[in-house]
Image (cartoon, rainbow, N blue to C red):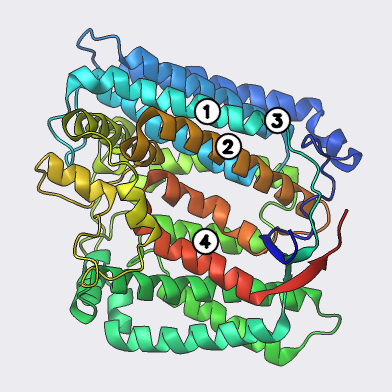
Amino acid sequence: MAGSVGVVSERDTLGVDGGGAIAATSRHDWRTLPAWLLATWVAIAMIVVLPLGLVSATPSDGRPVWVVALSVTTISGLRYAWIIADGRRRLHEMSFWVFVYVFLGLAPLVQLRTQQNPGTTPRIDPALNQPAMVVVLVGIAAFCVGLGLAMPRRSWSPGWTVSDTPHMWRTVMLAAFALALDAYFISRVGVGTLFSSRGDFLLALQGNWAETSVAAMISAFTGMTLLVAFIAMVNLVRRQQTREWPLIALTVVVGAALAITINPLSSARYVFGTVALAVAATFGLFATAKRFRGIAILWVVVLIVAFPLADAFRYSSTAEFKSGSVVESLTSPDFDAFAQINNTLLYVDNHGITNGNQAAGVLLFWVPRRFWPEKPSDTGILLSESRRYDFGNLSAPIWSELFINGGWLALVVGMLGLGWLVRSRDNGIEGSLQNARAPGIIDCVLPFYLMILLRGSLLQAMSYLLVIVGSTIFVSRWKRVAPR
């Protein structure tokens, strides 16, 4: 359609044919024997050693539903090992499967065997554990179908598309805006608060911006404009034939501001992790298949072991660790995704699906509640209130979000679409990395932000997503697409 606009990398199709096969330039890598030997050991560790180790370390009350969790670890472990052997930089899919493996495989395995629910989601209905596992498996199956859909050759009609090449002056404008906004933000919350604890930071936000949606938007604009501006400026510096020192100096200043504003003490772990991995990807973390494999293996270990420990500064400026073992960690509030799927089924049983009402709140998240008093709360809070929990800041994985909006149909269609989108974006990333050390701007960020979207709630995640996408479009060059 004339005048159409697409948000795609200008190298999306380089090295990728209509079926998603990578050109001969990379085929030699994934067929090497060492890669498959490594993947075999990864599969043994993920499918056999770790699950059976957790089984032996936990008691069971005789209910066999925990066996279904083993099927989740097996499916996700096999696919994850295959991705490692294959060597193509499937960054989005890597995020998806590591989330499934840890949050919907290992964590439910331990929780179902011990009958110990996360402390923030007590009184889970045991009768809904098996249906909840079915929801997980149906979502996985639909996602896999989406991955397997044949990718048609791109035949864009005349229009405009956004390339992954940054525009010099728009990037400088975004950097200037981000620095000015960051200065304002820091002047309100205080530099000391940024290096105190997450609890103090949240109190400072509430003290300055009582409206939750306003505070979320200001935080999102401050952090994500800095991130996108920094990535774009690194790209500009890399593309310069001669080093422009004013540009380099501005890049350093933006990077320093980003490091101060998004740090591991006051920032949410998912946000800090997204920023850290995005910056690392910009500097070539996934430039080779070997690096990709190493990070993929390390990521599983980090989520199981280090992720719960990273919350040590949530309430205090001195480290306070919540768990001392893997088993204890997997029953902590960090891993409440399966419990929330259970609560979603109970909510639907009692109240029915919301017929898209929750989705409307997500799409219109930017509307202040004073203008829309009936605006839906995020799904995690809705489920918490329906169970009369004392704690409301709970997750709502994408399985819950889809099911509560439209039941089984929404779950299948939504996960199928997610699988198709993930494959499409990962094909583009691999094509870009055949010709550069880093993916395009947005593909340095979204694969890792996907973890936040998968864990939910979506309403909480949308402000950051909007700023990431909008800022990327603003700094990118627009190119005319000729008809093919």
Residue 234 is marked as none
Question: Please, what secondary structure does the residue beneath circle 4 have?
Answer: helix
Question: What residue is drawn where x is 66% and y is 29%?
Answer: 148
Compared to 470, does 35 lie above or below? Answer: above
Residue toward you, 426 or 101 = 426
Is disc 3 surrounded by few (<14), some (14 to 19) or many (20+) residues within 10 Å? Answer: many
Q: Is residue 400 left or right of residue 9?
A: left
Residue identified by numbered label 2: 419
Labels 2 and 4: the sequence-earlier one:
4
**In the rendered structure, which amino acid carries the disc numbered 2?**
Gly
Determine the CA span between mark 2 and mark 3: 20 Å
Q: Earlier in the sequence, mark 4 or mark 3?
A: 3
Q: Residue at x 87, y 34 (%)?
A: 28
Q: Residues within 10 Å of mark 2 (few under 14, many from 20)?
A: many
Residue for badge 1: 142
Which residue carries the number 3 mark? 85
Amino acid on which the number 4 mark rests in the picture: Ala
Q: Are marks 1 and 2 in contact (CB under 8 Å)?
A: yes
Q: Residue 276 shows which numbered tag? A: 4
Residue 122 in sight in this render: yes
Q: Horizontal and vertical percent for residue 316?
A: 21, 64
**Residue in the picture at 26% in, 47% down:** 380
